[in-house]
Image (spheres, rainbow, N blue to C red):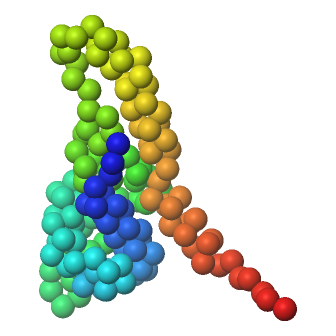
Amino acid sequence: MKISTKGRYGLRALIDLAINMDSENVSIKAISERQNISERYLEQIFSLLRKAGIIVGRKGAQGGYSLGKNISELTILEILKVLEGDSIFIDINDKEENELEDFVNKNLWKDINKIINDYFINITLEDLVDDYKKSKDTIIYYI
């Protein structure tokens, strides 16, 4: 299993958006600069997220993006499925003609997919934002 840069950058961009959108829209340019991700690539990623209703775009002087869903309800699984497609884990061919391959699919790969699926469905964007903010609040004193 490998999550592409689209999935990794998209997740980072959404966390950035959630952290920085306080009361106004956030521009792709601002996210691009903070996260060191190409604006063009972010536009492609945001197009997918906008079509899925995860983010909302607004044009004009006060334009930019905001979240289209509540971060407490937006799971990492939902985000990754939009960015990576339905087969983000191990792609299984259900029409295997090989008996051993069919056995491995049913007894290993489907179980792994379920474990990964269950893991990502139980983490929300809010969880990641909160954990990130907590990590930034930690102060280390040296004497």
Counting labels gives: 0
Q: Is residue 139 left or right of residue 82?
A: right
Q: Quadrant of residue 41?
A: bottom left
Quarter occupied by the C terminus: bottom right
- Where's residue 89, x and y in %? 33, 39
Where, by quadrant of the figure, is residue 19 drawn?
Answer: bottom left
Q: Is residue 67 visible?
A: no
Vertical placement of residue 114 versus 30, above or below: above
Which of 34/54 is in front? 34
* Quarter of the figure with the N terminus: top left
- Can the viewer see residue 71 in this picture? yes
Identify the residue at image location x=25%, y=49%: 84
Q: Could you tell me residue 96's position as x and y percent? A: 20, 15
Q: What is the residue that sits farthest to the top in this orientation?
A: 99
Q: Nearer the viewer, residue 126 or 37?
A: 37
Q: Position of residue 35 (x, y in %)?
A: 36, 78
Q: In front: 57, or 38?
A: 38
Residue 91 locus on image (x, y percent): 26, 32
User: Residue at (18%, 15%) from the top-left corner?
Assistant: 95
Q: Give the answer, above or below, for where 61 lies relative to 6.
A: below
On the picture, is 93 further left or further right than 68?
Answer: left
